[in-house]
Amino acid sequence: MDKGMVMSEPTIEDVAAKMIEIRDARAKLKEAFEAADAVWKARWEKGEAWLLNKLNTDGSQGYNTHVATITKTSRMTASAADWGAFAQWIRDTGEVDLLEHRISSKNLKEYLEVENAALPPGVALRTELSVSIRRK
């Protein structure tokens, strides 16, 4: 590059166009990855199903081979079939530790706007600024 050459400041349109190009390229890469990964995921799930069937058939909790240790595990997940009943039970028993420590940002924002209220005690609020770019 010529040392005497001065680069001009990019325009908003130039930067926006480049960002749309970047977003499109990332979307294509993500789509290609997800398509390829779906094949590997299906193979993994088939292997998992085979091993679980083998463990169950053998009445075993695990295997130890030269290449891997295979262990049958279980994971419990819970969801509320009736939030009202569960919330009442939490109030009645005080078992708040059964709840995740997370605040719904969407609902808090709505509460603050509708009630024109102050931030509830113990809540830390952080606002993140970003840029939204929409294709025309």
Image (cartoon, grey):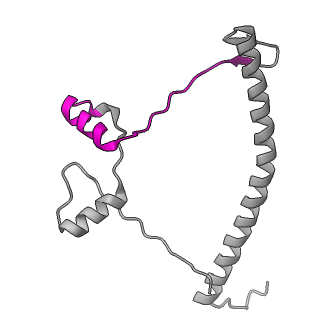
Span of residues in magenta: 69-96
At which x and y percent is residue 72? 65, 18
Residue, x 21% and y 59% (percent of image)?
Answer: 119
At which x and y percent is residue 103? 33, 50
Residue, x 58% and y 23% (percent of image)?
Answer: 74
Q: Does 108 sit above or below residue 135?
A: above
**Which quadrant of the rendered structure holds the N terminus?**
bottom right
Asked whether 48 or 132 is in front, the reply is: 48
Asked whether 85 or 98 is in front, the reply is: 85
At which x and y percent is residue 106? 36, 61
Q: Residue furthest top?
A: 59
Q: Is 29 within the magenta?
A: no
In this rendering, position of residue 21 left or right of residue 93: right
Residue 27, picture quadrant: bottom right
Q: How many marks?
A: 0
Q: Does 22 sit above or below residue 35?
A: below
Residue 13, picture quadrant: bottom right
At which x and y percent is residue 14? 65, 87
Residue, x 50% and y 27% (percent of image)?
Answer: 76
Q: Is 84 within the magenta?
A: yes
Q: Does 78 sit above or below residue 36?
A: above
In this rendering, position of residue 136 left or right of residue 84: right
Asked whether 66 or 32 is in front, the reply is: 32
In this rendering, position of residue 110 left or right of residue 22: left
Residue, x 74% and y 34% (percent of image)?
Answer: 45
Residue 30, picture quadrant: bottom right
